[in-house]
Amino acid sequence: MAELIAVLEERVSASVQLLCFHLSELRGLARWTDRYARLGLTEPALTTLIEDCQVLLTRVGDFRRAVDDAAVTFGAFIRWMLSVSVKMVPGGGGGAESEQNVQPISAVDTRRIALFIRQDLGPSRLLQQLGTHLTSCSPLRSLSCQID
């Protein structure tokens, strides 16, 4: 995730900002009609391009925020899984030392984890992902499902 954020910041966002800047310069030159009209530079066309470039810059920012949010949510889920796994191991894995090394989960992280489990790991999503591996289940939906 950190690599994706770095690419978005260093390459994509910077390139789109530079493109907007140069398009703005071209729009200024397009106002000099006797010199640049022969090249086909028109102010309305460049204004449309600049607006589209600004929309692209906004979308890149939205995508970056979505990636940040997914990274934070997934990190909270992993911390929660670690804390649960440490508590489930009876007397092994260092005992009290392991529980002290696990970071506490805040209320905000708990909400993120609940939303992540409900939306991304919900029953329908899990069944879609496991659909090819699930061969047969009892009609009563008991826990006697057989998995390949």
Image (cartoon, rainbow, N blue to C red):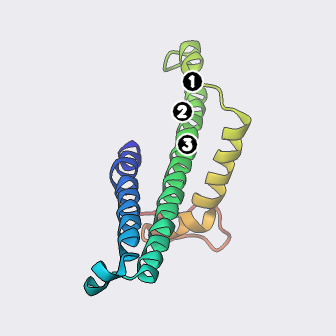
3 horizontally vs 75: left or right: left
Q: Position of residue 138 (x, y in %)?
A: 60, 70
Residue at label 1? Answer: 102
Do the residues bearing badges 1 and 2 touch, measured as CB atoms within 8 Å? yes
Q: Position of residue 87 (x, y in %)?
A: 61, 27
Labelled disc at residue 82: 2
Residue at label 3? Answer: 72
Question: Foreground: 115 or 82?
Answer: 115
Labelled disc at residue 19: none
Amino acid residing under circle 1? Val
Select label 1 or label 3 by which is in front: 3
Answer yes or no: is residue 130 visible: no
Select label 3 or label 2 by which is in front: 3
Farthest residue, direction left: 39
Q: Dot 3 surroundings within 10 Å: few (below 14), some, or many (20 or more)?
A: some
State the residue at coordinates (47%, 60%).
60
Question: Foreground: 5 or 122?
Answer: 5
Q: Is residue 144 above or below residue 2?
A: below
Q: CA distance from mark 1 to mark 2?
A: 7 Å
Count of marks overlaid on the render: 3
Assign the C terminus to one quadrant of the image: bottom left
Tell me the element at label 3.
helix
Q: CA distance from mark 1 to mark 3?
A: 17 Å
Q: Earlier in the sequence, mark 1 or mark 3?
A: 3
Q: CA distance from mark 3 to mark 2?
A: 15 Å
